[in-house]
Image: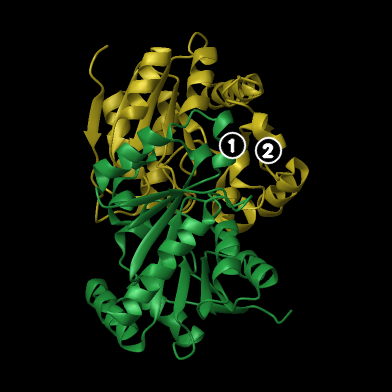
Chain colours: A yellow, B green
């Protein structure tokens, strides 16, 4: 396997993040590239979900992955080994989130010429990443069953900014006090338009529904 | 039940956090009060662990709880209902962590006269809380089995600053690919002195060992 490209991204102290994010989105629109910002708490299964998704989608669209992490490159290595999809690792240098400028530094390294879809796996954190528009076309998050169905009450902004919530690890639902309908109602209190898709990334159950949503979004972005 | 006291804490823009933290620790030493800073990712079981712990410890030391959260007061309500231990809710106003000044604002509301031990439940986040010394005497964190045994590789600072790591939800170990020995070795790569105690907050297994550690720490702080 080729060595994973690791990018040490830097924060721009003169930033106007909302403007940077809008500029980035415009550029992505011009170039026909869809950027998905995938967020979650640590250990919710972002990387496993991505692997299942990439293996279903990689022959339908040209896709690349940016794995953001404070340290380590375990995720990018895993993604490349399990899917063959081009992946780079973004080191945030201790930062707890990505902003639009940091995202752009990543995209400059991915290159926007030969790609339809870039998935950004954000830092595992339900707080800070929700506060910074990365310039992505859509925000999605994963809430895993063991975290509990009350998380939309406790991390309101995260659920407010997400277009899609994947409820992962449904296979262990019998071992946890997690009520899917109650969780959905908490999510919709925060964001009535949020779509909710239950999945089990370990077995692949429900991932097709996510792939369908993602392909429809990519096509709409490229063609409308 | 009495209504929960909710404190809206503010960030001090002129702060020198390390100095504030040292000052706070000195004051706690003078007054014979032990402050434990309990950190974790969202949904790792901090509140359930606290309930089990408080019910075992509340007749041995005078204890109070500060529950930090971005929003909501579900945790403080739960704690009071399940244990009767005095608890206040700290609202961080969107902030992803507590610093020493914010902690002091909480302690001013708890009052340090009639208490031996205060437990601060920090914001659910493995990144930012690790960067700010709260003034606590000891830092502890909970890593739950569903999050995965690789977390010390991905959130290095959190594991470096913690004196104690509780590995929670050991009851679901058979359903997850979590190797306790591998996890311990990752933790000790980050912090060779960290103590590790496996627990199951749901059933109470292992919580006695945590209580023993905590009582020994409180006594050492008050008497040495």
Image quadrant in which you'd find residue B55: bottom right
Image quadrant in which you'd find residue B80: bottom right
Name the secondary structure under disc 2: helix
Residue B5 spot, x, y in % from top left = 60, 80
Q: Quadrant of the C terminus of chain B?
A: bottom left
The residue under label 2 is A175
Q: Is residue B143 left or right of residue A80?
A: right
Give the residue furthest to the right: A181
CB atoms at circles 1 and 2 under 8 Å apart?
A: yes
- In this picture, is A141 found above or below A63? below
Q: The disc numbered 1 marks a residue on which chain?
A: B
* Residue A163 visible here: no
- In this picture, is A190 found above or below B154? below
- Name the residue at 58% across, 45% down: A147
The residue under label 1 is B172
Q: The disc numbered 2 marks a residue on which chain?
A: A
Does mark 2 fall on the same chain as mark 1?
Answer: no
Image quadrant in which you'd find residue A88: top left
């Amino acid at each position: 396997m080729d060595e994973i490209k690791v990018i040490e991204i830097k924060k721009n102290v003169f930033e106007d993040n909302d403007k940077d994010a809008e500029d980035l989105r415009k550029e992505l629109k011009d170039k026909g590239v869809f950027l998905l910002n995938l967020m979650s708490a640590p250990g919710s299964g972002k990387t496993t979900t991505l692997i299942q998704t990439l293996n279903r989608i990689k022959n339908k669209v040209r896709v690349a992955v940016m794995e953001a992490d404070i340290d380590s490159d375990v995720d990018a290595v895993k993604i490349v080994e399990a899917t063959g999809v081009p992946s780079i690792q973004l080191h945030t240098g201790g930062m707890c989130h990505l902003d639009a400028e940091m995202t752009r530094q990543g995209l400059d390294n991915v290159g926007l010429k030969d790609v339809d879809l870039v998935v950004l796996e954000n830092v595992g954190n339900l707080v800070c990443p929700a506060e910074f528009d990365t310039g992505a076309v859509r925000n999605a998050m994963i809430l895993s069953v063991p975290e509990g169905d009350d998380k939309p009450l406790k991390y309101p902004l995260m659920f407010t900014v997400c277009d899609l919530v994947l409820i992962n690890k449904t296979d262990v639902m019998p071992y946890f006090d997690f009520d899917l309908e109650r969780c959905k109602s908490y999510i919709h209190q925060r964001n009535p338009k949020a779509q909710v898709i239950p999945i089990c990334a370990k077995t692949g159950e429900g991932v097709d529904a996510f792939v369908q949503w993602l392909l429809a979004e990519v096509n709409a972005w490229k063609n409308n």
